[in-house]
Amino acid sequence: MVRDEGLREGASDVEVEEYLRRLCSDVTLCSPREGFFSHYVQQINEQVSNDFLTKFGKLTSDEERLQTTWGVKPIHTLKVQRFFKEKSLEASEARRGDGNKVFQEKKYHQALVYYSQAVMRAPHDGGESLALAYGNRSAVLYHLGHYHLALTDIDLAIEAGYPPSLTYKVLDRRGQCYIQQGVYSQAQEAFRMAAESLPKASMDGKKREAWKRDLDRKMDGCVGKEDRAVHASSRSVSGGAKLFAGPSPALPNASSVVEIKHTHDQGRYAVVTGPVPTGEVLMAERPYAAILMDTKSGTNCTHCYTRLVAPVPCPTCSGVAFCSASCRDKGLSTYHRWECQFLDLLKGSGVSLNAYLALRVITQHGLSFFKELRPSLRASPSLPSARQPHRPSHYLSLYHLAGLQEQRAPQDFFHRSLLASFLLKILQRAHFFGPWDDEGPPDKGLGEDEVYIGGLLLRHLQVVQFNAHELTGMSFAEGANNFKHTKSVYIGLAIYPTVAFCNHSCFPAVTRYFEGDRMVIVSLRPLAPGDVVAENYGPIFTHHDRQQRQRKLLSRYWFRCGCEACKEDWPTYDNMVDRRVLRCQTCRAQLPPRTHNNQSNVKCVECAASNNVVTMMKTLDQLDKLYVLGCRQMDEGKREEAIQCFIRYVDGVSVLLVPPYRELHLAMQSLRLLVAARGTIHALPSQK
C-alpha cells in the first residue's frame, strides 16, 4: 500500500518481479481502490520514518511487531465502532406485503424471495412480524413442494410467537405437509392440535364448525395408514469420496500411499510411496476454517455454504443467513457472536477475504481455547508419522504452515501489523477479552492476552497468504450436463491443512472438486513412487508460456517454479507440434526416433533396452479411439462413462509417450471438468 508510482521505463526483470510481488502482496491485505483501509495505511506510511521501518524490520516475533505498531500514535485515529445491517420492522412488513400480493397471483418463487426478505429484516423483539413472515413463507414452501422446509418454518413461526388466533392455520398446514410426506401419524397429531386451537381463532361459530368438520375428516383419513420412511434432505452432502488404498495412519485425510517429505527449498510437501493410477482419490478434507465471500451472503449459508432456499436469520443483524436453525445456532455460539455487529465495518474497510479468514480462525474458538494452547506453540513441527500423526483439526496444523516470514520486507510486516491491529480493535469492542469501554482512550495499552491474540492474527495474515484455497463449486453455463461449458463458482476462502502440503506444478498431478466444503483431491495422471502430489496454483503450461507463469508465481507465491514443464520450456496448446515421442518401457526415458519407417525396434540410450515401437504405435492408435469415444460421451452428458474412457486413455498414453502431447493434455483437461462435476453443482432454482 505504498503509493503506486508505476515502473520506470526500461525497468529490469528483477525490478518488474519485485514490483509485481509487492502489488500482489498488498492485494492480499485490502483492495487498493475500495474501502477506507488502503487510504488509512497510506496516511500512516507518511507519518513513519525510514529509520522506524529499519528498526521494525529487525523485530523477531509477531507479538513484538504488533506491540510496536500499537505504539504508533497515528494508528489510533481510525475509529472502530459497531456498524452492521440492523433489523427493520417497516422493511419486513413491506416485503411481507409484497409477498402476499404475488402469492395471490401464484407467483410462488417471487413470493418466496419476498417472504425470505421479510424473515431476514424482522426484529426478534417479541413482536409478530417474524412469526408472520415464517408462517407465510411456510405456505409458499408447501406450494413449491419443499415440505421439509415448510415444516421447519412452521416450527420457527410458533417458536417466534405466532398469533394464537391464527395458529390453527399453520398446524393444519403442518398436517398437510406430513400427508405429502406419507407420515400419517404425525399428520393426524397436527390436525388434532389444529382442532384444539380453534376456540382461540378469530372467526364466527359457523366457520369454526366448518373447520372442525374438515379437520375431523382429515384425521379420519389418516387412520390405518402406515407411515412411509422420510428421506434425508437432498441438500445434504454425502461425503462419499473414498481414499485410494485407505487412509494413511500418519495423514488421516490422505491416502495410505501419501507421505510428507521436507527439504530446505521445498519445505514440507506430499509425495506418493507407490504407484497411483489416474482418477484415484488421494486426499479428502474439511477445512480448518472457512469464510463465505460477502457477495454470497444472500445466496449461501454462512456456516455450511449450502445454497439457500429458506434462509434463517441472525437475531441481531440482517447481514448473514443460515440454511437451518442448526447452522444458525452453531454460528451464534462461536464466530458470529464476535463478528455480528462489525460486518459492515469490515465490508466498508475494503480488507481482503484473507483478513476475514485470519479473524475467523480466532473467533471460531474463543480466548480460553488459545490461552490453553499457548505453551504448545513453542514446539517445532515434526513430519507426520504413524506414532505422531498429523492432526488437521488441531490449530497447530494451521499455525505451522509456511508464512515465509524470512522473505518479508519490513514494510510488508508493518502493513500486516496495521491490519492485525485493526482486527484486534474489533475483537476488543466485541468484548472478546471482556468488558470494553467505548468511551475510553483508543490507544490504551494492550494486556497480555491482547498482545498474544494480536500476534496470532499477524501470524494468520502471513499463513493465509500462501495456504488458503478458494472454496468453489461448479455450474453449467449452457444446460445441465454440458461439460464443455462449465465454470467454477467462487463461494469463499478456506484453509485445508493437509491439502496445503501439495506443492505446485505447471503440469499438475492432481485436480480437485468439492462435496460442500469438503475438498477432494484426485490424481489427474498416473503417479510413480516418489512423484510429488502437485496441484496447480493458477498458471498452467498449456495456457501460459514460461515467462508468464514464472512471473505470476513469483509475484503471488514468492517462488520460481522448477517443474518439468518449466525446465524443458514446454509449448502451450497453440504451439504444440503434433508428434509422438515414445518412452522406454523399461526405464521410462525418451527413446530416440526411428532411423527409417521399417525399423521395428529402438534401443534406449539410457538403459540399452530394446523397445518394439511398432507395437507401441499400434497401441496408441487404439488409445486414440478411446479418446474419441470419451469426447463423444462427454458431449452426450455421460459423465461417468466419459471419465472411465479418459482415465484409460491417460493411463495408457502416459506409459507410452513422453509429454507434452496435445491429445494427452486435452484429455486431462476434459477429465478435470468431468471430475469437478462429481462435486457440488451450483445452479439457480428452476423458475417454473
Image (cartoon, helix red, strand yellow):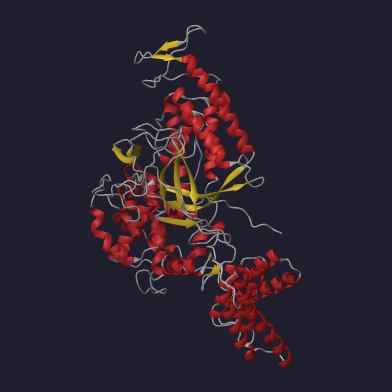
Side of 322 relative to 449 (left or right): right
Residue at left 45%, top 57%? 356
Residue positioned most to the front: 224
In the picture as drawn, the residue positioned furthest to the right comes out as 105
Residue in front for this viewpoint, 504 or 76: 504
Total numbered labels: 0
Residue 235: which quarter of the image?
Answer: bottom right
In the picture as drawn, the residue positioned furthest to the bottom comes out as 205
Compared with 205, 125 (above or below) is above
Instruction: Report if residue 7 is visible in the image.
Output: yes
Residue positioned 37% across, 13% down in the render: 605
Quadrant containing the C terminus is bottom right
Residue 1 in view of the camera: no
- Is 499 on the left or on the right of 55, as rendered? right
Pinpoint residue 155: horizontal percent, then vertical percent.
55, 76
Instruction: Identify the residue shown where x is 40% and y is 66%.
Output: 427
Locate residue 96, reporting x and y percent.
67, 74
Occupied quadrant, residue 402: top left
Residue closest to the eye, 597 or 516: 597
| Residue 600, position as x, y percentages in the image | 47, 10
Residue 156 versus residue 528 in the image, above or below: below
Q: Position of residue 12 (x, y in %)?
A: 45, 29
